Image: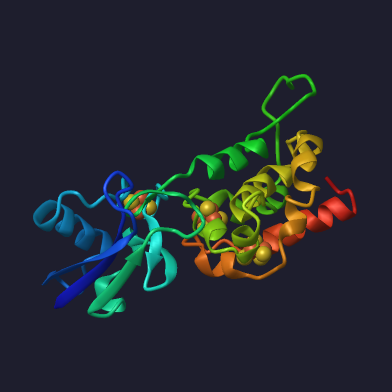
Amino acid sequence: MQVTLRIKRFNPEKDKEPWWGEYKFAAEPTDRLLDALNYVKWYLDGSLTYRRSCAHGICGSDAMQINGSNRLACKVLLMNLGQKITIEPLRGYRVIKDLLVDMDAFLAKYRSVRPYLVTHTPDPEKERLQSPADREKFDDTTKCILCGACTSGCPSFWADGEYVGPAAIVNAHRFLFDSRDEGGEDRMQVLNTLDGVWRCRTIFNCVEACPREINVTRAIGEVKKALLYRKI
Ligand code: SF4
Ligand code: F3S
Ligand code: FES
């Protein structure tokens, strides 16, 4: 098939404004969009800049707006996108160059919720045991690959860049509901605030955006409920 990639380009060292680059070439319908971006970079314009690594939907590097929706470029087939494909950087993050956005603030928010197992009690003699039913409580939120698509798609985040955002809450959920964890109080300091979970207005864009099909809004709701009834 013939495809035209229409890519929003911007190099702050050279450009005053973003501009659209158009690249027309032949590709296989079963190629993924990442293959097409690589074709542009390797054969048509080596200056095109974007993140990618695993090419298999695992590392979370290549989230971008594809025909207006946040998706991973390595997980969408050209045949499902039409012949003219519009590609833009994720919304809400500073553009470093072309499709490459600055994730520093996003990752700082992730770190602020202490996304790791916290314990205060002395280590037991054997491992800390957990029942399958307790493990199930946070199974969905273990799937996050930190692609940033959910936070980028959230209108509450567009309105208030200080909002901790759905990705950080998902990763807090993963440990808050872990029966072995004892760090809930510290996480509450971050989440039980106006820029924490209460900034979420249950808009559901995050669910639509998540390439891992995590029910982000449900996870946020569970954290809100736990905070209200102090179950953490
Ligand atoms: Fe990406 Fe989903 Fe994790 Fe959000 S919750 S960062 S969309 S994987
Ligand atoms: Fe935003 Fe998702 Fe809440 S889109 S407002 S974080 S439900
Ligand atoms: Fe790793 Fe797409 S390149 S998720």
Task: Specify the quadrant of the image occupied by residue 79.
Answer: bottom left
- Residue 109 left/right relative to 91: right
* Residue 31 placement (x, y as % from top left): 21, 67
Q: How many labels does the image show?
A: 0
Which quarter shows the C terminus?
A: top right
Seen at 61% across and 53% down, the residue is 141
Side (left or right) of 135 relative to 88: right
Asked whether, in this view, residue 225 is left or right of residue 131, the answer is right
Image quadrant of ligand 2 equals bottom right
Is the image coloured rainbow, by chain, by secondary structure, or in one colour? rainbow
The residue under the point 66% across, 53% down is 136
- Residue displayed at 19% across by 49% down: 47
Residue 76 visible to the viewer: no
Q: In which quarter of the image is residue 114?
A: top right
Q: Quadrant of the N terminus?
A: bottom left
Between 98 and 62, the residue placed more toward the observer is: 98
- Residue 82 lies, in percent from the top left, at 27, 80
Residue under the image location 26 percent in, 69 percent down = 6
